[in-house]
Each structure stands twice: as C-alpha cells, then as structure tokens.
Amino acid sequence: MARDTLIDFFDDLARSRGEFLVYDDGFRSRRYTYDQVGRAARAFGARLHDIGLAQGDKAVFWCENRPEWIVAFWGCVLEGIVVVPIDYRASPDFLTRVARIVAARLVLVGQDVPAASVGGPFVVWKLHELDWDAPAGVGAGLHPSTRSGWPEPVEGRAGPAKVSKDDVAEIIFTSGATADPKGVIITHRNVLANIVPVEREVLKYRRWGRPFFPLRFLNLLPLSHMFGQAMATFIPPMLPGTVVFMRGYNPADIVTQIKTRRVSVLVSVPKILDVLREHVLRVAPEAATPGPKQHVARRWWRYRRIHRLFGLKFWSFIVGAAPLEGELEAFWSELGFVVIQGYGLTETAPIVSLNHPFGTKRGSVGKAIAGVEVKIAPDGEILVRGENVTTGYFNAADDTARAFEDGWFHTGDVGEIAPDGQMFIRGRKKEMIVTPEGLNVFPEDVERVLNHVPGVRDSAAVGVATGSEERVHAVLVVDPGIDPDAVARAANAELEDHQKIRRAVVWPEPELPRTEGTRKLKRAAIREWLRTGATPRAAPSGSDKLTELVSKYAGRADLSSSTTLEELGLSSLERVELMVALEDAFQTHIDEGAFSGIQDVGQLRTLVERAATGDAPPADPIAFPSWNRSLVARAIRRASLPTWILPLGRLFAWMRVEGREHLANLEKPVIFAANHQSHMDGPMIIAALPAKWRYRLAPAMAKEFFKPHFFPEQYGRRAWLTNSLNYYLSALFFNAFPLPQREAGARQTLRYIGEVLEDGFSVLIFPEGKRTDTGEIDRFRPGIGMIASRLGVPVVPVRLEGFDKVLHHTWRMARPGRVRIAFGAPLTLGGDDYEALAKQVEEAVRGL
C-alpha cells in the first residue's frame, strides 16, 4: 500500500467498487460509481493537457459541493495542476483577487455562483456541464458548448504527470476578510501525512464493518475546506463508502436525506447540530429533559422516536471547522448518537487530532494522529510539528516566518493536553480577552452562559478597551421585548468575577455576522461596530438577503416593499427559481401555493419570515403517484399494452414511424418532447417506441383535466367518480402522472420528474400545453427548457402528424386514418434561458 503521491491514492480509488457519489440538487438525484469517477477524472485531466495546461499551472475552483468538483480535483492532481479552491459563497471580487494572485489559467465555476461576474485573463468552465461519458483524449471532459477559447491541443500525452511528495497539490486561501488573503501551500506530502495514519486505523476495523456497509456520509462541509475534502474524497474510499451531497441546509431536508438514503454519518460544522437540535425539539419535545444515566442501549430505546426520525442506520456526527459546544455534544450523546470531533487547521492539511469513533471523550478533540507532534507553549498556545504542516504561505515569506518558530507551527489556538494525550481547546489566542488583572477570559465561556438566558437567540463576547483597560462586552440577538441589561445581570450571576459583562447591547440585524463556510463569528467586525457605533457592513440582514436575491432574478436593485412582482417582469419559472433560492438562503420551506399568490416584495418578505419562524401553514403537496411504478402495476401494464390496448389503438391509427435509429445507442432515461394533437398521442407514441423504451415511459397528463379528482368539493359525486376512474386507469395502464399547467406546483413537479428519471423511466411531455385545432404546432412553453436543463437529461424531439384527423379533441369517437410519428436526434440543453431552450426544442420538432 505504497503512498508516494496522491496519484497512488487515486489509483486505488478508481479501482474501488460500488457507489461513490450521490448528488441531490433538490430536483433530481444523480449517482456515480468509483469507476465512473475514475474514468471521468482521467478524461478531465486529459482535457486539461490537451488545451495546453502544464504542470504547476493553477486552476481556481468556485463551485458548490457536487460530484464534478471531485472529478475536476482528481483530474488536476493527475496532471500536476495546482488546485485553488474557494468557498462558493465568496464574493466575485474575492475570486478575482485570488485568481490574479496565483496567476490562474482556468476558473471552474458551479451552478450556484454568479458565473457571469467572473472576469480576467483566464478561461471559465462550468463544472456542472462536465461530460461524464466523454472518452479520454482531445475534447474530453466537457460538453461541446464549453470547448472553446483555448489554444490548439498539444500532442504527446504520455499519462499522469510526474510529481513528487513535495510538489504543490493545493493552495487554499483565507476567507478574505483582510485586504490581502493568505494562500496556504499544501503539498502531496502534507495530505498523505494526514490520510495514511487514518487509513491504517480504518484497515484495522474494516472487516468488522462489512455487515454495515456501505457506510454513507452526508457531507455538508464545503469542499473548499480541507476537512470537507478529506471526508468526501480521501476517507470514504478506505471503506469503501458513499458520499451524499445535497443542496441547502434546511433541517427538515437534512433529516429526510439521512432517513431516505440510509445515511450512517453526518459530516458538518457544529452549527448544523444546533439547527438540528431545534428541529428535533419541535418534533420530540421530550428530548429537552435528560433522563437518568443509563447504558447507551437503554438511552437509544428511550429516544427511539428520534432514531426513527433519522432512520435506524444513522449513528454518528463528525464535526469540524469550528469549536463544538460541550452542551451540544452532550445533547446528542444523551440521545444515543456518537459525536466525533477533531482539531486541525488548513495549515495542517487539516487534521492534528481526532477522536476515535469507538473511544470518544466528551469535550476532547481526541489525540494527535500518528506522525504529528503537539505541545503547549508557556502562554497556552498549541504548537504543531509534522509532515502534515504546510511549508508556508504563497508568495508571503514574512507571514511564513512569523508562523514558525524552531520548526513548530503557531496555531493561534489555546488549549491543554491531558496526561493521557487527550487535547482540549479553550479558544483562539487572538480572541482571548485579557483583563487588567492579567486574567484570561475565553469568549466561548461567556457566550455559553449568555445563550442559556431566556430570550437570547445568539451572542458574541468581545473585549473592548475602555481607557487603558479591556473589558468584556456582549452583543446579543434577542427576542422582541428582551432587555439587554437584564440579560447581562442574569449572566453575571453565573460568571466568575473576571468574566463579568461590563456592557450588553443588541445587534441591529437578525443574525450576527459569521463566515459562510464554517459559521464562525466575525468578532473583528463586531468589535469594530461596538467601538464606532456604526452599522456593520459585514453583517447582511435577512431583509438584505431577500432583497439581494430578488434583485438577482429581476436584474434591478431599486426595490421597495411596494414593488410588485409584475413590475419586475418575473416569469412563472423565474418565480420558481427565486422561491428555491429563498428556501436555500433562509433554510426553510415555502408553500408554493401561497408563493404563487404573492403580489409585491412586502408580501414576499412576510411569507418568507413566517416560513422561517415556522408560523406559515404547511404546504398542500400534489398527490403524485408512485404506486404505478410498483412491480404489480408494471406487470399489469406489461400484460395489457401488447395484448389489447395498443392493438386497439392501431385499428384506428395506421402508423408510419421514422427516426427509431436515433434511439439505438441512446442511454436511458430521456425526455420525449412532442407536439400535441389528440388524446391518442401518448398511447401511440408508446406503441411506436422499441420495447426497451415502451415499458419504461411515464407520460405527463394535464392535471387540470382531472380537476374533479383533485378538487372533489367543487364537483358532484358522479363527476368525481368518473374523473377519478379515468385518472387511476391512466396512471395504471400508461404510467401517466399529472402535470400542473396553470396552478402552483412547478417545483414539486420537477422533483417528481427527477424521481421518475432516477428510477430509470423516461418522461413524455407535450410542451405546447394544449391540443391542436387544425394540426398546427403552437409555441412550446419554457417549462420543457427548465426541466431539461435542471434535470440534466437529453431531450428527444417527436413530431406527430395526422392524429387530429383520427381523434380530434372535439370528437367523442375516433376515425381510422394514417398518422406519422418521427423521432429526432437527442438534444442536450443547458443554461437558464428557458424560453430559448424551449424554442430550440420547438424548432427541432418542426424540422422533423
């Protein structure tokens, strides 16, 4: 098991079996095996070589967590290209600064970043357009739409780059709060010094874990963070395990992902555990009161309702990137879950110490991993030495010199080491408050007390100089009507003399300023606000977030509460995308029906605030069928279609089928998009398809056609009975599902279509939304563009002719006649100009 460079590790990863990565973007899930990731990474690396990138060139990653990030990372490693990851929530200005500092040749962007704002002497590639099926060689790795702007391919490719342990693998920059962000240099040696000791420990226990495999990790740590990378691409292959990425941080969605995907371990920052605790307490209030001390098995049984909520396979949290409060750790441990935390920094690639999964000690960040030395300086600072420690900062010799002393790296953290080697972190050295008496106050200790005071939602303790003395000040986020002085008095009653709060003030925004990725408090911004009394620029409010999002989709910034959505010119699909963005930003669910009735920005703000606080009424979901994809329903369909349903249709529709050759080498699933002429369109397209497609198709039918079924209170009993019978027969014999045309439900529909595609079924859609009167083709609605682009599946255009003369939509009975069905070449659609994409599909259908 030689590990000279990361390329050696990749070779083992690519040979692993089973599912590696799962990505759920809120609309559709995509799954990739280790073999697929390995092949895609080699193809991507070949693409980098072909367009002229050389070993040592820099590629900046500005992308949300997604499988293509992992593919591009390994593609760069194979070619010796230096990866420069930054958080996808960082500003475009920060991206540009970093790209210029490292002289980047390439910027890789995701789907959730404002790619249009990226500018500079480098080429931009969209990672979500990566072509998973491209072969290695010239032009591989990306869709044709992105293969431009580069020099002619370079010949002579001979395989992976020749790299050594001391070659640079990554440069990771700080968040950019200062004018000059520092880039931490990470070599192959640094990363291997971290993952090889962990691998040795995993191998000791792997055979005992086989009954529980595959272990699935829901990874919510950003891949721009070293620990997020370790838990996404280095640790899982050792088992091997599966990594799940999801969009957003809504607690209900997180719990749903854990349960439905049978996740074993959640990897996140401590703040996520706090959010989940609030969610659990709403669902199971009994968890708020700890029970008597019992064995973990008895505690598991006592809180079995909560374990059922997460699913019986879920057992552990792995937290990193920020300190974990002891009370939060105790809460989850009391419920019978294992909480594993470690300690590290970007400069240590990233792990210094780690709790053993089968030997955690409350409050401890574990023992130093093999090969890492740790000692405590006289002032309490933690010093680290080992091969995992960075060689320094990029083009910053002075910063590098200040960070090291006699080979020991100064972490800036204050801590203790117990006699048994367990480490305990007290706080950041630079954030420690030193009183005039020379006593140290750790802000976390004060905040722990403040956050227990009723009415306090969040707090920050900072040191502010008054004259020549530094004293503790508290900045609070509180419920309406809470007196900050009363909060200070209540907290001071529990604090030591040197910890007592001199002054407490209320922060003027709904949230304290925190870093995007790790959710650490921006104490410098808070301290500066206290000192100057000015409104902080570093703390965007909830209202600011809402305004920024609406402005993004409207293309204008002059908004007020009375600005109507009609004035903004938002289409129905843009409204859906705005709603999804608001849900992600505010970590909540919005009732799509209520959202569709919003008139202006003020009403939108009210709806979002109610949803975020849990005051909004629950959404009324569309009853999409799943039973019609069951084994029994499929068996009935398989027997009925060829024996009597399709032969009956062929008696009236005398078909001529063209273009079947376009389906011969096409991988399922796809979306079939056809013009609409008759009620016979769906059944006869099914009849025209080859058998391997015929029985794996789900046609869409207008939900409005089944109003008596969905809204029985508006119709008589007879109408409901007849209409419901038609609905269930359509769902059973044709695997059809309802597609809303005019009412709310676009997002739910997208999600359902994504589930259908994930099950291996193709989808048939009629983008006109209505049947023809005279045989003409009407304008295709932009929904087909949104569905194809968001779900990432090819669209096969289908042209129908003559069906209106066999069964016109005004007729009650069919008449025999000749019809034509033509299948076109599949289209790959991307981007968010859904009108243009729909027009592209329409033109393809017209051209058949």
Image (spheres, helix red, strand yellow):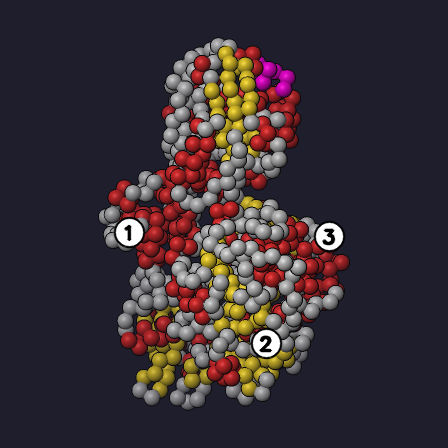
Crowding at dot 2, Cα within 10 Å, few <14 / some 14-19 / many 20+, comes out as many
Locate the N terminus and report the quarter of the image it occupies: bottom right
Q: On the image, numbered disc 1 is attached to which residue?
A: 556
Q: Secondary structure at mark 3?
A: helix
Q: Quadrant of residue 319?
A: bottom right
Q: Residue at x 41, y 19 (%)?
A: 775
Find residue 211 and name its label: 3
Q: On the image, numbered disc 2 is attached to which residue?
A: 389
Frontmost residue, 62 versus 239 = 62
**Where's residue 246, x and y in %?**
52, 52
Distance, label 3 to label 1, CA atoms, is 56 Å
Q: Secondary structure at mark 2?
A: loop
- Left or right of 381 in this view: 503: left
Q: Is residue 719 above or below residue 516?
A: above
Q: The residue under label 1 is which amino acid type?
A: Arg
Q: Is residue 289 above or below residue 836?
A: below
User: Which region is colored magenta?
Assistant: 642-648
Q: Residue at x 62, y 51 (%)?
A: 136
Mark found first going from the N terminus, 2 or 3: 3
Q: The residue under label 3 is which amino acid type?
A: Pro
Mark found first going from the N terminus, 3 or 1: 3
